[in-house]
Image: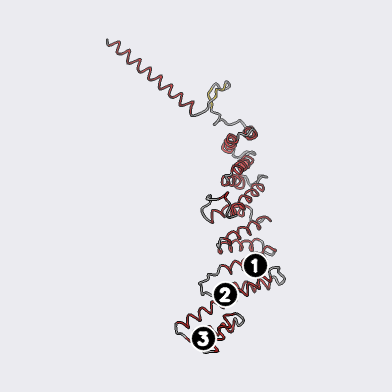
């Protein structure tokens, strides 16, 4: 009886072991694809196999791409970057991955792979091409109202991040200045005047004694005027811009922006006259007649041809 029980127990244990082994094998084969290789006499998972040389790995990855097996091609190019990061094929794999993700509509990943070329393979002949495609992505990103980027970027800085990085990658080439102007205009349209002017200052610094410097100085005047808060009574801001105008007209007497700058000057005079008028009215309402008269007279002296100068003249003539 005892022997029979022992036999039963052993049988149960053996059966459980077999079941457990079968379970492990099923899990082993269901979660991964494995192949038997006669050469090594081992089971291998192609997902983790790397070709013997970077050239073979690159060609292997490209064969999948040519056959339309894009996801597999992505995997194989990433393996090249992981196992052969210093090879002559690494930059090419980065560029191809960038192109693939760009075509898939994943612009962030695409941009990052192009950036990897700039940062990790600066001597590669693909650097210029990578920056060019980055610029295309950045410009597309700056354009507002595009469904393509709807909900993808949370704020202004995220929208401008790409273009700032492209400018940083190549700050002095002929295309850089055009990118800077586009970035400055982007900030301007969103009423981020300080950031817009900051970009223009970089153009003035990096491209001095060029027509770009002239245009940047003109735009700085234009953007500065629009940055003046309506409710502010601070006339120092206006005086600073008027100083910029005087310097501009002296430096560029035949500028193509001359008439626009003069019109801006007229607008500024009206703005400044309005500020003085508001100050004078404040003192008048507060019953401080002497202070009010002081600012009304200042209006008459500085801005006689503006509507506020003419109002001030009438008030003084009538003794307020």
Residue 27 point in image, percent of width and height? 45, 26
Q: In which quarter of the image is residue 204?
A: bottom right
Alpha carbon separation for disc pair 3 and 1 = 36 Å
Q: Which of marks 3 and 1 is nearer the N terminus?
A: 1
Q: Earlier in the sequence, mark 1 or mark 2?
A: 1
**Residue placed furthest toward the left:** 1
Mark 1 against mark 2, which lies toward the viewer? Answer: 2
Q: Mark 1 points at which residue?
A: 218
Q: In which quarter of the image is residue 8?
A: top left
Residue 227 point in image, percent of width and height? 56, 67
Task: Please state which of residues 13 and 26 is positioned toward the viewer in this rendering.
Answer: 26
Look at the numbered discs 3 and 2 and tell me whether their residues touch, using CB distance below 8 Å: no
Question: Above or below — where is 290 with respect to 86?
Answer: below
Residue 317 placement, left or right of 21 = right
Question: Above or below — where is 102 with respect to 55?
Answer: below
Residue 153 placement, left or right of 244 = left
Circle 3 SS class: helix
Circle 1 SS class: helix
Circle 2 SS class: helix
Q: Mark 2 points at which residue?
A: 271
Alpha carbon separation for disc pair 3 and 2 = 19 Å
Q: Earlier in the sequence, mark 3 or mark 2?
A: 2
Q: Residues within 10 Å of mark 2 (few under 14, many from 20)?
A: some
Residue 215 point in image, percent of width and height? 67, 65
Question: Above or below — where is 93 with respect to 238?
Answer: above
Residue 42 point in image, percent of width and height? 53, 23
* Picture residue at 57% right of the left edge, 78% below the top: 273
Look at the numbered discs 3 and 1 and tell me whether their residues touch, using CB distance below 8 Å: no
Q: Name the residue under label 3.
A: 293
């Amino acid at each position: 009886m005892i022997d029979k029980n022992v036999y039963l127990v052993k049988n149960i244990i053996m059966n459980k072991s077999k079941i457990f082994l079968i379970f492990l094998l099923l899990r082993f084969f269901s979660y991964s694809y494995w192949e038997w290789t006669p050469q090594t006499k081992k089971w291998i998972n192609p997902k983790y196999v790397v070709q013997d040389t970077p050239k073979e790995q690159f060609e292997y990855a490209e064969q999948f791409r040519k056959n339309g097996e894009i996801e597999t091609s992505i995997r194989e190019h990433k393996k090249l970057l992981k196992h052969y990061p210093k090879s002559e094929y690494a930059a090419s794999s980065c560029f191809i991955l960038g192109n693939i993700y760009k075509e898939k509509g994943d612009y962030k990943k695409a941009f990052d792979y192009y950036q990897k070329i700039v940062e990790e393979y600066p001597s590669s002949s693909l650097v210029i091409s990578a920056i060019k495609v980055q610029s295309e992505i950045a410009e597309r990103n700056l354009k507002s109202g595009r469904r393509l980027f709807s909900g993808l970027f949370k704020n202004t800085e995220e929208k401008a991040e790409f273009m700032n990085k492209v400018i940083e990658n190549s700050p002095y080439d002929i295309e850089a200045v055009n990118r800077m102007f586009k970035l400055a205009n982007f900030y301007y349209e969103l009423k981020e005047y300080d950031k817009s002017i900051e970009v223009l200052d970089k153009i003035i610094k990096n491209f001095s004694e060029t027509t770009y410097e002239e245009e940047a100085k003109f735009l700085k005047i234009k953007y500065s005027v629009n940055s003046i808060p309506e409710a502010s009574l601070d006339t120092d801001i206006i005086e600073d811009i008027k100083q910029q105008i005087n310097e501009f007209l002296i430096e560029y007497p035949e500028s193509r922006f001359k008439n626009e700058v003069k019109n801006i000057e007229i607008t500024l005079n009206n703005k400044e006259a309005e500020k003085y008028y508001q100050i004078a009215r404040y003192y008048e309402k507060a019953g401080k007649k002497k202070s009010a008269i002081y600012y009304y007279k200042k209006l008459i002296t500085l801005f006689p041809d503006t509507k506020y100068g003419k109002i001030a003249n009438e008030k003084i003539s009538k003794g307020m």
